Amino acid sequence: MSQKIVIDPVTRVEGHGKVTIHLDENNKVKDSFFHIVEFRGFEKFIQGHPYWEAPVMVQRLCGICPVSHHLAAAKAIDQIVGLEPEDLSITAQKIRKLLHYGQIFQSHALHFFYLASPDLLFSADVSPDKRNVVGVAMEYPELAKKGILMRKFGQEIIKMVAGKRIHGISATPGGVHKKISAQERDYFLNGKEIPSIDAMIEWSKEILEFIKVYHSKNEDWFNQFATFPSGHLGLVNKKTGDLELYDGYLRAIDDSGNITLNDIPSDAYQNHFYEGVEKWSYLKFPYLRHLGREKGWNRVGPLARMNVCEGISTPLAAFERLSFLNATRGKTNNASMYSHWARLIELLHCAELMKDLLEDDDILGNDLVRRGNRRSEGIGIIEAPRGTLIHHYQVDEKDRITRCNLIVSTTHNNEAMNQAVRWVANKVIDGEPKVSEAMLNQVEVAIRAYDPCLSCATHAMGQMPLEISLYDHLGNLTDVKRRT
């Protein structure tokens, strides 16, 4: 009889998931799984609602990245009212992008400073009582303070555009429903009430210096921990091939950098992707149909975006990307821990983009909404903080949604997270008679590198204590580790 280690649920991620690791009678790893255990229902219960309600409804998928769902749905609904992204007014386009970059900025700050930094600043065997954001604040107060203020800045951008930090309303079919005033804009430029956008840029540069120094001291760990070959998927600029976060073409490459999906428009995604299923998880497994399930899966998110793009449009982030590429001598990066470095490059990129938009008088315009010729189908694809996000709707002649398909970022990363768990199981737990807290934490470190949003994928909620149980080959409980 085999043994089974259970981590239920995984901590310092958004939502619920658990890990099981199966051992034989000699404590050798047989297999491991990252389970998503809650049922996904949003695609079904949104049916029957008027299409214009979708951008408001779907953001309830999550309290961490509601803006991403709001905007992906809005792009799909724009198509239903007959508009492509470039058909919106310049003001509406730029207001939406400002909202989007504010969302990515605050989400990346949240993940790095609140969730991931304990994995970098404290060793795996440090007590869980310290290995958290409170421990970071106690030992690195200046770092924690800046992280809090950076997240606040992004949230304030969201509040200005959407009315609330969480679950606000900005996008309407064909544009945006609210203009921005000069006074609202100046709040982010003058630094009188909150640190200015210039401060956000400087602080982003500082935290990038931190990660580069940290990498130089821990390069072997970066290169080895949870490293495995995979495909990479993301949006690129339609003209330049640069990193694109709001509207672009889908590009995928394999683990060596060969193109496997060559810059397709959003409307063609369903011709190229299938979604596999497994009996042990409610989360699906997307893959490129022409490569098949075994070879066609891709990582998404900051690491994948750095791999698939040809450059970055903002100068400071473009320079930082060169340092990032130099770490692997320009080769495709398949090491999970580099996701943190890539995420911070995007943090700086979004700060630069927000500065450009805040200083652009186009965002103060009055031309907010446009209309085209009604269609029965709409597809919106956007780069959420965690990766490529797809919203697809079909509507009937009475404007009711008849079909909804959502492929969220964490769904794309499902196979990658399972691969990461298997790597830790085989390299850290294999052959060990007992499960230590440090071993348990390394499983979670591998998962957290992907910044998973499990409630986006499964719509779960609640507190996340942790219990791991070890059974011998006869099924007897031999060891228990519990967190509350």
Image: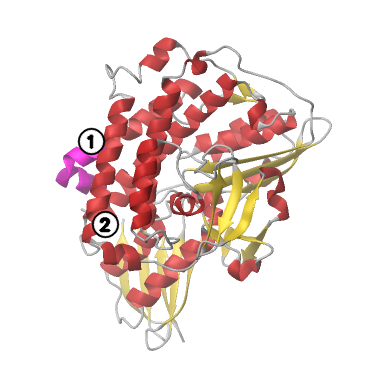
Vertical side of 249 occupied by 103: above or below: above
Sort mark 1 into few (<14), some (14-19) or many (20+) by Cα contacts within 10 Å.
few
Which residue lies most toward the left here? Answer: 139
Its colouring scheme is secondary structure
**Residue at image mark 2:** 215
Pinpoint residue 153: horizontal percent, then vertical percent.
35, 28
Pinpoint residue 392: horizontal percent, then vertical percent.
68, 43
- Identify the secondary structure beneath mark 2: helix
Whether residue 367 can be seen here: yes
Pinpoint residue 277: horizontal percent, then vertical percent.
63, 64
Which residue is at a point 36% across and 64% down the rendered structure image? 467
Magenta stretch in the rendered image: 133-146
Looking at the image, residue 184 sits to the left or right of residue 250; the answer is left
Whether residue 167 can be seen here: no
Residue type, label 2:
His
Instruction: Using the image, tell me which numbered label, if any, was put on residue 145.
Output: 1
User: Which residue is more in the foreground, 309 or 453?
Assistant: 309
